Image (cartoon, rainbow, N blue to C red):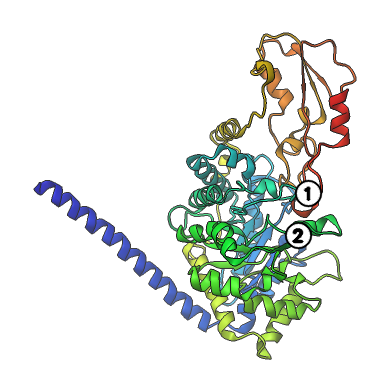
Amino acid sequence: MKKSCLLNNKLIKTITSIFLFQIMSCSSIDGEVSKLVSSMTLEEKIGQMTQVDYRYLADKADIGKYFLGSILSGGGSTPPTNQPSSWVDLYNSFQGEALKTRLKIPLIYGIDAVHGHNNVLGATMFPHNIGLGCANDKALVQEIAAATAAEVKATGLDWTFAPCVAVAQDERWGRTYESFSEDSEIVTELGVASTIGYQGRTLNKNSVLACAKHFVGDGNTVFGTGTNWYKIDRGDVVLDEEELRSKYIKPFKESIKMGVGSIMVSYNSWKGKKLHGHKYLINDVLKKELKFDGIVVSDWAGINELDKDYKTCIIQSINAGIDMNMVPGSLNPDDNSYDDFIRLAIESVKEGSIPMERIDDAVSRILKIKKKLGLFDKPIKAPKNTDVVGSKKHRDLARKSVRKSLVLLKNKGDILPLNKDSGKITLVGEHADNIGYQSGGWTIHWQGGSGDITPGTTILDAFKSAVADSNSIHYSKYGENLLNPDVVVVAVGEKPYSEGVGDRESLHLSDEDIKLLKK
């Protein structure tokens, strides 16, 4: 009994010490950030609130000129040589520019690592969230997020725009595959598991900053008219507030409890009002009520849809509670660029349209996250763990996750599983031998691609490796020469896409697929 009491007392003291250490650490960071913010000029503050895609950086010296707070790589935004060490070099070259500034505030670099470190050639690609939702395995999802985080860190980067915690309701939406489930409970559980995998139990120097997205209601917009882009992806959510909270805000609420460090705002509207300018939902609900103390970041040029006047967009979005604006840049000279954002934001503060208190809050949130991630301590990264990218351990995990995510809809006559010695097998269809199609959107490029865009095992490769005699496996892309097989396997499916480009009015198979099946 005495021994038990002693052990319990030691445990209580240990937990208390950890708790007090965390309080003291937070208090120390708060004090450091407060002091730093008070020493910053308005130009330095607005710079911290600006995020630019590196492809659209006119000159890397602009990082220092405008005091930029963040760089990102959107889909397809890769170094000229897409290999892990090149990413580290790219990161360090930009970070070096930030460290030349007066206050030497480091950059934070973000990337869409949404099903593995999917922009990087040779990285491990995991199933998209729709597959992981089918597996419905919290431990597996956490392990996948941790593996992804390890590969992200190995390339020097700090921040992934994941997990997507949309509760998709309309399968015609082009981002449905980024959603774990139509069930809010499943999305919440797996979203929290992902957050833990990326960040750990607390945000620290070993974490990759997670980003719960998109706040809020994406995946349940009213099907509209016009171009494909706006039919579903950026439409209007017409739910009452009770349902919005119980189903769609819930995953964010639980992610916040787990310490998610950033949240991305959604393109859609709620009852006709765009989320990027929705002060009630961002400031009142997300920040005040749910006590989210991390970074609220816009989606790609997301503020631009608030008004025809760009300055009005800037004022509305910052006043609504957006802390960091993903400008992010464009090759089109008629589009708004990061220098436009910075100039007009400064102008808006000086004229009183944006309170300095709001600016200080935004900058404080950004700097606190950078402090917690240890960016001030070690801003320059060493390419010492690049061999973890695409490692055997991670690929084995990917194979396990594929097996767990597969869904068998029908097995008439128990034809499956196929006998490896069942004779000649002919595979038909483009998807049978196309790693790009197999990987889907957000793979190397924003919209994905076709062919050998990244290393991997196609269905045809797998069939050949599974049998004793690979000559028993024949491939006929268009079904024009079947060679009298004992079994025909037809691989059909969607071609890769992402976001609004994938919005569809119908879920029917393509005419080409139907024609192939009939053949």
Q: What residue type is disc 2 on?
A: Arg
Q: Is residue 139 visible?
A: yes
Q: Residue furthest left?
A: 2
Q: Nearer the viewer, mark 2 or mark 1?
A: 1
Q: Which mark is residue 55?
A: 2
Q: Residue furthest bottom?
A: 351
Q: Along the horizontal axis of the image, is 508 left or right of 199?
A: right
**Of residues 370 and 215, which is closer to you in this image?**
215
Q: What residue type is disc 1 on?
A: Gly
**Of residues 91 and 147, which is closer to you in this image?**
147
- Secondary structure type for disc 1: helix
Q: Is residue 204 visible?
A: no
Residue at 67% in and 49% down: 86
Sequence order check, earlier mark of 2 and 1? 2
**Of residues 220 and 59, which is closer to you in this image?**
220
Q: Position of residue 55 (x, y in %)?
A: 76, 59
- Secondary structure type for disc 2: helix
Q: Classify the position of the C terminus by image quarter.
A: top right
Categorize mark 1 by other alpha carbons within 10 Å: few (<14), some (14-19), many (20+): many
Categorize mark 2 by other alpha carbons within 10 Å: few (<14), some (14-19), many (20+): some
**Of residues 288 and 202, which is closer to you in this image?**
288
Q: Which mark is residue 232?
A: none
Which residue has dot 1 on it?
A: 502
Residue at 74% in and 57% down: 233
* Position of 304 relative to 186 (above/below): below
Q: Position of residue 135 (x, y in %)?
A: 56, 37
Residue 27 location, quadrant: bottom left
Q: Along the horizontal axis of the image, is 219 left or right of 147?
A: right
* Position of 401 relative to 351 (above/below): above
